Image (spheres, rainbow, N blue to C red):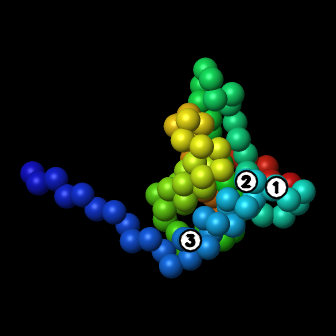
């Protein structure tokens, strides 16, 4: 069976969302979206990074994860970003379904 490699096309708003996420990682707002959850210590278990943001609605999960990893890498550096074992972008309703409380 042939192996077919595919990459989803980058959404037109991807660069804008990446830059907004970089700004939020550098200077978190006290309220509003995106809401960023960073779980783990980065040493023994790595990091799990969840970003709750309704702006994700038109992007596939893979694109969301790539944007999160790109932004985290830009802000924290390659050494820290390589410790991320899970990066997931969720809308508010998806986060609630997954058991993440954003209030």
Q: Secondary structure at mark 3?
A: helix
Categorize mark 2 by other alpha carbons within 10 Å: few (<14), some (14-19), many (20+). some
Q: Is residue 52 above or below residue 83?
A: below
Categorize mark 1 by other alpha carbons within 10 Å: few (<14), some (14-19), many (20+). some
Q: CA distance from mark 2 to mark 3?
A: 15 Å
- Please report whichever mark, 3 or 1, sits nearer to the chain's N-terminal start: 3
Q: Secondary structure at mark 1?
A: loop
Answer left or right for 87 relative to 31.
left
Q: CA distance from mark 2 to mark 1?
A: 6 Å
Q: Report the residue marked by disc 1.
A: 28
Q: Report the residue marked by disc 3.
A: 15
Asked which quadrant contains residue 20, the reply is bottom right
Answer left or right for 4 relative to 18.
left
Answer left or right for 66 relative to 4.
right
Answer left or right for 37 relative to 48.
right
The single residue placed furthest to the left in the displayed view is 1
Q: Report the residue marked by disc 2.
A: 25
């Amino acid at each position: 069976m042939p192996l077919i490699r595919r990459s989803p096309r980058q959404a037109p708003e991807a660069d804008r969302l990446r830059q907004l996420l970089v700004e939020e990682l550098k200077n978190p707002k006290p309220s509003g979206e995106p809401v960023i959850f960073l779980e783990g210590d980065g040493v023994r278990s790595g990091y799990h990074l969840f970003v709750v943001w309704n702006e994700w609605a038109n992007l596939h999960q893979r694109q969301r994860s790539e944007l999160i990893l790109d932004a985290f890498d830009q802000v924290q550096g390659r050494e820290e970003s390589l410790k991320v074992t899970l990066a997931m972008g969720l809308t508010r309703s998806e986060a609630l379904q997954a058991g993440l409380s954003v209030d």
